[in-house]
Image: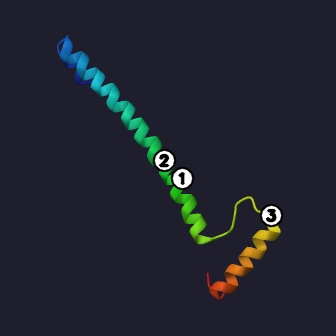
């Protein structure tokens, strides 16, 4: 954007500023999309590590599910 201000006043400078503004907006949307994808991947990793274990499930249910996982994997985790 700094280089755009060195252009002579006129249509080219105006078009370059508009292109820079659109590029900045696309960059922000892309950052938001990547952030959302990272959150989704984190959630999927957690679900893959502990299938069936819901973050808001009852503590007794969590204990039962953990016991099932340990028995299924032979207690090696």
Q: Which mark is residue 39?
A: 1
Using the image, tell me which numbered label, if any, was put on residue 35. Answer: 2
Residue denoted by label 3: 58
Which residue sits at x=72%, y=76%? 66
Residue 1: tell me if it is visible. Answer: no
> How many labels sit on residues?
3
Q: CA distance from mark 1 to mark 2?
A: 6 Å
Quadrant for the C terminus, please.
Answer: bottom right
Query: Is there a contact, CB below 8 Å, between mark 1 and mark 2?
Result: yes
CA–CA distance in space, label 3 to label 1: 24 Å
Left or right, 74 with respect to 45, comes to right
Left or right: residue 68 versus residue 1 is right
In this view, the mark in front (3 or 2) = 3
Q: Earlier in the sequence, mark 3 or mark 2?
A: 2
Quadrant of the snapshot with the N terminus: top left
In the rendered image, residue 70, in percent from the top left (x then y), is placed at 68, 82
Question: Going 69% across and 86% down the picture, which residue do you hit?
Answer: 71
């Amino acid at each position: 954007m700094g280089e755009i201000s060195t252009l002579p006043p006129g249509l080219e400078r105006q078009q370059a500023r508009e292109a820079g503004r659109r590029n900045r907006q696309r960059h922000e949307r892309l950052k938001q999309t990547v952030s959302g994808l990272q959150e989704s991947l984190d959630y999927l990793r957690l679900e893959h590590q502990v299938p069936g274990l819901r973050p808001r499930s009852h503590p007794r249910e969590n204990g039962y599910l953990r016991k099932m996982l340990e028995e299924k994997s032979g207690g090696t985790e």
